[in-house]
Amino acid sequence: MAEGDKATLIVHSGEFDKVYSALIIGTGALSMGMEVSIYFTFWGLERLKKNELDKGPLSRMNFFGLGKWMMKRKLKKTNVREMDKLLEDFHELGGKILACDMTMDIMGVDKEDLREEVITDYCAVGTYIKEAKESDVTLFI
Amino acid sequence: MTKCSKIDVLGETCPVPLVETRKAVRKSSPGDIIEVIGNHPESKEEIPMAVDELGLELLDIEEEGDQWKIRIKIPEED
C-alpha cells in the first residue's frame, strides 16, 4: 500500500443520515483498497451502543420521526444495504472502529454498554492526530 | 489452482457492488478470475477504478441492455 492510501473519519454526529454516510464512505474507501479508521466521539459514540446504530434522528426534516420513517421506507425501496450490514462489511474488510475514551467518561458510557465485538480500540485525540497525519482523506462528520 | 468466482450484484446499489467485489478479491488467490454481474450504472465505472487502485487486471466489460459483466484477474505473483 502506498503511503497516504488511508482515510480517517471522525463521526461526531449521531444522526441517522450522517452515520449512514460515514459507513458508506468507509466501506467504499476500503473497497478501493484504502486503510480506514472511523473514530466515534460525542453524539456519534451513542450509535456504538448496543442496538443503537440506526436509532438517531434525521439531521434535517426529521419531523418528530415521520421524516425518518419516510427515509427508511425510501432506502428500503431503493434496496440500500441496511446500516447494520454495512458495519459488518466495514469490519469484514478490515476497517477500524475506534471509540473515544473521553466521551465515554463524560457521558458515563461503560465498555459493556457498547458493541465491543466491532470496536478495534478505545483511544484519545493523540491516536486520531497520528492517523490523520498519515491520511490523504480526513473527514469530520 | 486457478479458480473462477461469480459475484451477482444485480439489483444492488451503492456501495454494495464495490464492497462485494472487494470481498471476493480478498478471498482470491493469484491467477484467479472474478466475474461481477450487476446493473447499477455507476458501479460499472467504479469497479474498474477500484481494479486499477488495487493493482488488478481488468480483463473485459460486457454489456447487454442495463446489465454489465466485469471480469477481473488477480495478478500472478512474480
Image (spheres, grey):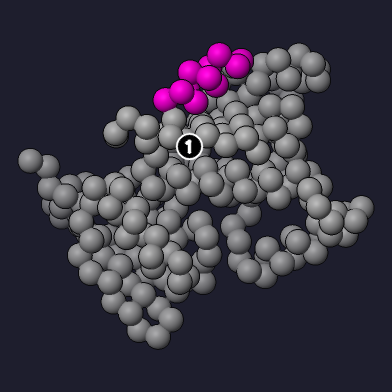
Q: Position of residue A57 (x, y in %)?
A: 81, 47
User: Above or below — where is A59 with respect to A49?
Assistant: below
| Residue at the image position 67 percent from the left and 70 percent from the top | A77
- Residue at the image point whose x is 23% and y is 69% from the top: B60
Name the residue located 23 percent from the left edge and 51 percent from the top edge.
B56
Q: Chain of mark 1?
A: A
Q: Main secondary structure of the magenta part?
A: helix
Q: Which amino acid type is shown beneath numbered disc 1?
A: Val
User: Which stretch appears magenta?
Assistant: A124-134
Left or right for B41, reference A10: left
- Picture quarter with the N terminus of chain A: top left
Q: Quadrant of the C terminus of chain A?
A: top right
Residue A126: say if magenta: yes
Circle 1 Cα neighbour tier, 10 Å, few/some/many (<14 / 14–19 / ≥20): some
Q: Is residue A35 magenta?
A: no
The residue at the far left in this view is B78
Residue A116 in view: no
Q: Which residue is mark 1?
A: A137
Q: Residue furthest right?
A: A64
Q: Is A26 left, or right, of A136 in this rendering?
A: right
Residue A13 percent coordinates (x, y)? 73, 37
